Every structure is written in C-alpha cells, then in structure tokens.
Image (cartoon, rainbow, N blue to C red):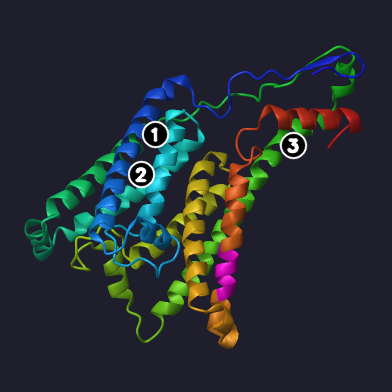
Amino acid sequence: MVMQDGGTVDVRPGADPGRAAPEHGGAYRTTATSLALYSGVLLAWTAYGIAQGDGNTWDFLEGLFNPGASPTTQILGPYEWAFTVGFLAIAGLALARRRVARSAALLCGWVLLAVSLREGVGLTDAAYRDLYHHDPLGGWVLATRGLGLVVALVVLCTMFPATERRRGGRPSTTAVDGPAADDLAVDGPAASGLAANGPEIWQRRPSRICGMLFLLMSLARLGWLVGDLATPEGNVGHYLHDAVDGSVLGTLDLAAPSAFTTLGSVLALLVLGVLAVRGRREVRGALLVFAALELYMTVRTVVLLTVTDFFNRSFDTPQGALSLVTTAYALAAMTSVVVLATGRGFGPHGMRADGLRAAAMGRGGGL
C-alpha cells in the first residue's frame, strides 16, 4: 500500500493465522478421513431409508425442513442429517488444515462418544442384544455404532494434542516505511495500553457475545425441560433412563431420542457458552457448527408451527406465548452466532483488521 505522502505500508502477510502448523497436518488429515468416512456411512443409511420409504427423493427433501411432510419414519433423524452435513464440512476444513476445524471436530468427537456410550449401556440388556441377532439390519447397525466409537476416539486422540504453540508476544503485522512511519508511531502509555488490551478486546468481544447467547439459550431450554418434568405426567427417572440407555425404545433405529438430544443440547450450549464467555477464541469452530445445527432445528420448528397454524393461536395461553418468544430468540440468537463466528474479527486477527487499527491510531492518536 502506498501512502499519499510517499511512504509505504507493507501489509504482506506471513504465515496464515487461520491455518494450523505443518506439524499438525497428519492429525488434521486423519480427522478429515475419519469424519468423511462416517458421513459416507450416514449418507448410505439416508439413501436406504429413502429407498425403503413410501415417498421419493423430493418428499424426503421436503421432510428435511417440514417435520410433517416425511411419508414414513426414516432410519436417521434430523439431528443425524444435520451432523452428516457438519461432518462433511469439517472434513473439508480439516483437509485444508484450517484451525477452525479443530474445536468443531472435537465437538463431533464428544457427540459420537456420548452416542456410543449410550449404546454401550443399552447392550447390557439381554433382550436388546437379541434384537441385533434377529433384525436383518442388526449387523449393519452394530457396525455403524462401532465405527462411530472408533471415529470418536480417533478424532479426540489426534486433535487434542494439535494445539498451536503460544508465542511470547504478538508479532507486528504491519511494517511502515517512509514518512508515514512517524504518523503511525505511538509512544507512551497509549501504546502499551493498546498492545495489552486493544487487539484482545477486538478479538474476544464476538466470542463473549456468542457465549452469552449460548448461555441464555441453555437456560431457556433447561427451564422448559424442568417445567415439563414438573408436570404430573413427567417422570425424571424415566427421562434420564431414556437419555442414557439405548435399550429403552426397544428398536435399532439410529435416530437419537428427544431425551438424549435435549439434554445433550443443554449441556453443549452450557459448556460452549462458558468457554466462549471466557474468551477462548479457539472454540469458534464448535460454536459455528453447533449454532448452525440449532438454527436448522429451529427452522424446522418454525415450519411446523406455520403449517399447524400455531402462530395464530400462540397468544391464547401464557405457555404458548412463552414458547413463541423462546423460538424467536433461538432463531435470532443462533443466526447471530453463525454470523459472528464466521466473521474475520472472531479468530486470530487478520491483516486487514490490524491495518485499519494502525491507520486509525495514526490519524487520531488512539482508538
């Protein structure tokens, strides 16, 4: 970049801050291969479900967003469909060695591990084990469960050590030559204050906003869960048993039950929210993936409320009004997190952001 006064500002980047270190290339490639393989298996189950159903491919595509449109129950559920797309996207990012893929892959690893542990608890029941022997698809379902466990362990074991080394100080990314150097130089307490707080505040603010949105969503969902379990029809013991034991439903469906997905969603929102509020910028990938998942599920809810004419009757009762408010917040909050987590200012700051801050300091003497 050439300044008007004849000076030049060198904004040529060095190492890509969004790319993992070369020594972690093997871990990222292994993760990409594992997630791509598992997503391929889920796609095969999806294709099998379409072939065995009463509808065609277009009916299935409509059922992706309209819960009442699918003609028959699929082997996989909406959460599995969403994670299939997520696995493929993360595999692509990991293959490109993007650092954002690390936390996203770790999130998927923990989810697959939780699913495998739930199935392991179910296999302690003799009647449930017999289903695998008598069901024609029992062997394939068990193989899929086993592959999920292997993928979870591989992803967790390879990506946990793939951390970036912390540097002692933040290297300068803007070199200034010529007369412009005098305008962009900052001395005294202002310079040390900016170096200590400015870039960190700039980068951590989106993370903390996302964290607060996640925490509020977690509390709202937990409140609904407690309210449902507090009714005469609610049974806390049965609900928790359904969440952690794969044999409760008595079927070999790969779709997770609502008890497992609800508790898992509350826990994931809580953990990721706390990490994001603490300014852990490396959690960006996990925030992006889970927010996209929650956004997809919320869109399905909105479509269902629309086709059932719930919006016209939502304010007839306080519970209906509160449900509508919660859905509206989920739609706005998860959209905001997706936008913020995709932005440049969330992760390691780029050259453009540094250049703008340096130019602003030079013109005004501070932020």
| Residue kind at label 1, given as amino acid type | Met
Q: Position of residue 230 (x, y in %)?
A: 41, 81
Q: Position of residue 311 (x, y in %)?
A: 57, 78
Q: Are marks 1 and 2 in contact (CB under 8 Å)?
A: yes
| Residue kind at label 3, given as amino acid type | Gly
| Residue kind at label 2, given as amino acid type | Gly
Q: Earlier in the sequence, mark 3 or mark 2?
A: 2
Quick one: SS at disc 2?
Answer: helix
Quick one: SS at disc 3?
Answer: helix
**Which mark is drawn over residue 5?**
none
**Which mark is drawn over residue 109?**
2
Image quadrant where residue 357 sits: top right
Q: Between residues 6 and 211, which one lies in front from this camera angle?
A: 6
Q: Earlier in the sequence, mark 1 or mark 2?
A: 2
**Which mark is drawn over residue 159?**
1
Q: Between residues 324 and 157, which one lies in front from this camera angle?
A: 324
Q: Position of residue 120 (x, y in %)?
A: 20, 54
Q: Are marks 1 and 3 in contact (CB under 8 Å)?
A: no
- The residue range painted magenta reads 324-330
Q: Are marks 3 and 2 in contact (CB under 8 Å)?
A: no
Q: Residue at x 34, y 30 (%)?
A: 30
Image quadrant where residue 75 sits: bottom left
